[in-house]
Image (cartoon, rainbow, N blue to C red):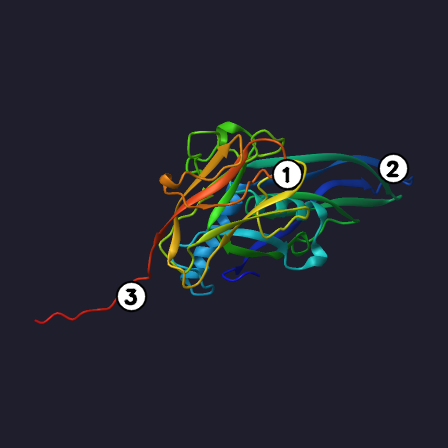
Amino acid sequence: MAPGDINIEILGKFVWELVFQYDNSGNSGTIEHTYSVEIVESYSSSQFLKSVSETTTKLSESNEVSTEVGASYGPVSASLKYSYTNSKEITDVLQNTTQSQIDQSQTTTTTETRSYTVGPYSTLCLYQRSFVAPGIAVKNDTFRTSPNPLTDDQLEEDVPLEFILRPNLYLVVYTDNLSSEPADRVRELYGAPEDINKGFKGKYVWLVPVWGTDTRKAINNVDLVIQGKADNRYQDLAKGAKGDFRYLIPVHTANNPQYITDLKLLRTPHSTQPDPNSGYTGTTGDINKGRKGDYLYLIWRTQTAYPIEVTQIARNS
């Protein structure tokens, strides 16, 4: 965990859902029963993130977790608390929901055909395990059979999800189309397109700053890291495009009173630096370095700011 990260838990539930109940009790022969089953992965990022936010607020108000006043938090990882109950389908959905910062819903369905043998003078119940949590529903490929219907206490099992939340200094927002661009995205200095992935295959990628007044969390600088390996602590600016992973790393330097107060993108056909007269004195390296296309920089202005110590003054009556 990074400094400032917090842990929370949200309750999910495993449910055994009845697929079929076959009664062969009046037959002396064996029955081969074929049935089509669906493997379903479904999530709604808005419902998921809303639940995370509400839970964090409640825990903060009851002093069960310590959060910074006015800070915005986002999930960077999620997992089932008890790993023995995990599955690939659940892992994939949790990864999708923690990586999405926009209102996005998706359902993936796979159909499989399975055969089951029902013995003479017997019955067979087939159950499929489902996992449900706020904004998440998964029917995975775990099945169980029983000669009799399961009891109520066998049908459901509560299981907590563990989350690591991190304060947001800016958000990298992914969309599937240009029209879904966030209204509060970082703009290009001269009105050029703001999509980080412009000209490359992959997601539309936008930067959305999170502003605040707490100098303990404010940033002084932004580092650009381009590397061949993924780093799950950060959000890839080249998501969906081939090639290197590209990350912006916010930097907070203690005892440096110069804080970033304005962000812009600078897109140009050639390598350059911001015009000194523009007031933008900070810049990253070329975000598109190593791939064809425009030169692209994140640039910023800074301003001196000091924390204010509030002292109560008693008035003379």
Q: Amino acid at mark 1?
A: Gly
At 73% from the left and 35% from the top, the residue drawn is 110
> In the structure shown, which secondary structural element does the residue marked by tag 2 occupy?
strand
Where residue 10 appears, x then y in whole percent? 55, 55
The image shows residue 312 at horizontal and vertical percentages of 22, 69
Query: Circle 3 sits on which residue?
Result: 309
Nearest to N terminus: mark 1 or mark 2: 2
Q: Residues within 10 Å of mark 1 (few under 14, many from 20)?
A: few
The answer to the question of whether label 3 and label 1 lie on touching residues, with beta carbons closer than 8 A, is no
- Quarter of the image with the N terminus is bottom right
Badge nearest the viewer, 1 or 2: 1
Between marks 3 and 1, how big is the CA–CA gap? Answer: 47 Å
- Identify the image quadrant of residue 159: bottom right
Please give left or right for residue 88 compared with residue 258 in the image. right
Disc 2 residue type (three-letter)? Glu
Q: CA distance from mark 2 to mark 3?
A: 78 Å
- Residue 161 percent location from the top left of the image: 60, 55
Check disc 3 and give the amino acid type: Glu
In the picture, measured across the screen, residue 284 lies left or right of residue 232, that is: left
What number is the disc on residue 32? Answer: 2
Q: Which mark is residue 113?
A: none
Helix, strand or loop for disc 3 = loop
Judge by depth and name the residue closer to the eye, 272 or 105. 272
Residue 290 is labelled as 1
Residue 16 visible within the image: no
Residue projecting furthest to the right: 29
Q: Residues within 10 Å of mark 3 (few under 14, many from 20)?
A: few
User: In this rendering, does residue 148 appear at all?
Assistant: yes
Residue at the image point whose x is 54% and y is 35% from the top: 295
